[in-house]
Image (cartoon, grey):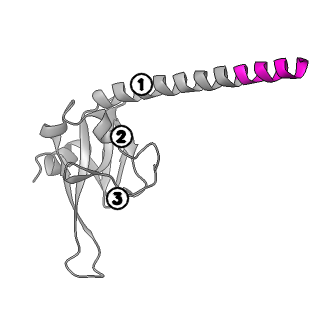
């Protein structure tokens, strides 16, 4: 009798603990969604197939500023497989390849909110952005890639 009561108590505690973790995860996701909604731009690289087998894949970099600025893409579209595969290939979204979603840090700089390990060609440090190993200021980056040219 005492053993069955102990088992029931343990099961209840485990269930309550799991429920608490689930709620924390929900709160974390809603916080992420708020950050995603406040993001200023999405950096997208459009993958170009190699001309012949064995050639490296080329990347055509675009920042689709006008289309994605403040809500052009939903958090669900941006999320895709990031939760399950943070180091997977760059995710394909609306015909492009997402490299990073940048959010303001509040001190004039930007940081990547979502990025994949496969996106090593892009990094953000303060107000400088590295594309293919070349550092650009944020303004240079926008002027070069921001109009989708």
Q: On screen, 35 above or below 96?
A: above
Percent x, y for residue 141? 21, 48
Q: Give the residue pinned by disc 2.
A: 79
Q: Give the residue pinned by disc 3.
A: 121
Taking depth in this image into account, of 137 and 142 the one nearest to the observer is 142
* Residue 3 on the magenta segment: yes
* Chain part drawn in magenta: 1-13
* Displayed quadrant of residue 102: top left
CA separation in Å, label 3 and label 1: 28 Å
CA separation in Å, label 1 and label 2: 13 Å
Percent x, y for residue 30? 40, 24
Mark 1 secondary-structure assignment: helix
* Residue 68 on the magenta segment: no
Mark 3 secondary-structure assignment: loop
Q: Mark 1–mark 2 contact, CB under 8 Å?
A: no
Residue at x 45%, y 42% (from the top left corner): 83
Looking at marks 3 and 2 on the same chain, the residue that comes earlier in the sequence is marked by 2
Looking at marks 3 and 1 on the same chain, the residue that comes earlier in the sequence is marked by 1
Residue at x 16%, y 44% (from the top left corner): 64
- Relative placement, left or right, of 20 versus 70 is right
Give the quarter of the figure containing the C terminus. Answer: bottom left
Decide if residue 6 is in sight here: yes
**Mark 2 residue crowding within 10 angstroms, few (<14) / some (14–19) / many (20+):** some
Looking at marks 1 and 2 on the same chain, the residue that comes earlier in the sequence is marked by 1
Q: Give the residue pinned by disc 1.
A: 31
* Displayed quadrant of residue 110: top left
């Amino acid at each position: 009798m005492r053993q069955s009561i102990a088992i029931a108590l343990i099961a209840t505690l485990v269930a309550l603990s799991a429920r608490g973790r689930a709620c924390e995860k929900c709160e974390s996701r809603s916080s992420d969604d708020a950050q995603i909604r406040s993001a200023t731009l999405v950096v997208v690289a459009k993958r170009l197939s190699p001309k012949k087998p064995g050639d490296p894949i080329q990347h055509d970099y675009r920042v689709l500023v006008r289309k994605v600025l403040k809500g052009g893409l939903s958090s669900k579209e941006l999320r895709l497989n990031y939760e399950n595969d943070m180091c997977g290939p760059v995710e394909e979204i609306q015909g492009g390849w997402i490299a990073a979603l940048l959010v303001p840090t509040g001190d004039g700089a930007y940081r990547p909110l979502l990025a994949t390990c496969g996106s090593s060609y892009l990094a953000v440090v303060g107000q400088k952005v590295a594309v293919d190993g070349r550092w650009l200021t944020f303004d240079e980056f926008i002027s070069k890639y921001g109009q989708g040219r």
